[in-house]
Structures are given as structure tokens and as C-alpha cells.
Amino acid sequence: ATNLLDFMCANSDNVAFKVSCISKCGLAKSLHCDILYTSADRLCWLHEGSKMGIGSSCEPKFTPIEIKSATKNSSKDQALGRICDSVPGKRVICVSFGSPNFRKYVWTSQYRAQVLHHAMVYDSNYVLFVTALVCEIVYVVVVHISPFVRTKYREFAMSMRQHLEWYA
């Protein structure tokens, strides 16, 4: 089985990111919106290098990881098809939240909402979205979620508080 640290090292030649210190996590509560909680599959430190390659002295960023597993051969073929057409040879892809490529590689609205939710609760600029088989990572999407998008989501969530009878 390929682990994420090895996968990112082997497949990040043209991507300015590396991963360290992957750990399991439990339920997390947002510090900025007390009605929102999440449970990412894993957490890591994401090191953002210069666009010319890894090696920047930037501080690592605390980053949630969401893992989706393909369990059927058809699912594997679909996952490979998503990346083969537009980024041949690349298995670590950087996208911005909401972009056409984001919608392509994070292929359901539920998964996209989950990525945004993790970013908001952890107040993270990035989420790693991993598409895998039982024993193999197919691709990793490094999703950038801007502070503006996270703030708008938080404002929306806070506006809903009054409608949540169970919370009041």
C-alpha cells in the first residue's frame, strides 16, 4: 500500500507542496462558528514551497485531509479518467475552490461541500482531497479555499443559527 507521504514525494515534481506529520483526528469544533463541527479523515502539515519547487522557508499549514475510496473497478476507471484527459502524468493537482477543475476532480456536490466545511472549521487555506483504491492512491487534489470564501460560508452558517431550534 502506498502511503500519502511517499505518494506526495513521488508525484509532486511540478507541484510546490509536500506533506508531513499525518495524524488521525476526532471531532473538531470551529473556533469562529460555535455551531459547526467536522471530522476530517486525517490532518497534516502542508508545506508550501516556491513555484519553482519545494524549498521555501514558509511556515507549514495545518491541513485537513478527506479520503474517498473507489471500491469497484469502474470507480477506478472513472477516477483515472478524471485526471488522464486534462493532466496526463500528474497525480497531484492544485485547484482553487469553485473552479471548473475543482468540480471535475472533486466530483460530487456533497464532496465539495465537505471540503469547504473542513476548511472553514479548521480555518485552513487548504484541504487535501485524496482519491484512492483499497491499496493505492489514484490522485491527490490540493484545494485552495480563500479566506473570503470561508468567511462567506461562516456568515451563512451563523445566519442559520436562529432557525436551528435544537441549538437555541
Image (tube, rainbow, N blue to C red):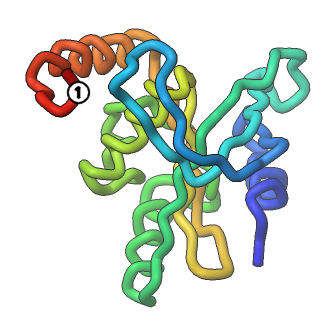
Q: Secondary structure at mark 1?
A: loop
In the picture, the quarter occupied by the N terminus is bottom right
- How many labels sit on residues? 1
The residue at the point 82 percent across, 31 percent down is 53
In this view, the residue in front, 29 or 165, is: 165
In the figure, is residue 139 to the left or right of 57?
Answer: left
The residue at the point 39 percent across, 42 percent down is 102
In the picture, the quarter occupied by the C terminus is top left
Q: Is residue 27 above or below residue 78?
A: above
Image x and y of residue 33, in percent: 38, 17
Going by the numbered disc 1, the residue's amino acid type is Tyr
Image x and y of residue 17, in percent: 74, 35
Q: Which residue is mark 1?
A: 167
In this view, the residue in front, 39 or 3, is: 39
In the figure, is residue 130 to the left or right of 135?
Answer: left
In the figure, is residue 151 to the left or right of 95?
Answer: left
Q: Is residue 108 above or below residue 75?
A: above
In the figure, is residue 131 to the left or right of 63?
Answer: left
Image x and y of residue 59, in percent: 81, 17
For disc 1, the neighbor class at 10 Å (few under 14, some 14 to 19, many from 20) is: few
The residue at the point 37 percent across, 44 percent down is 114
The residue at the point 30 percent across, 20 percent down is 153
Which residue sits furthest bottom? 73
In this view, the residue in front, 35 or 11, is: 35
Quarter of the view holding residue 55? top right
Q: Is residue 95 above or below residue 65?
A: above
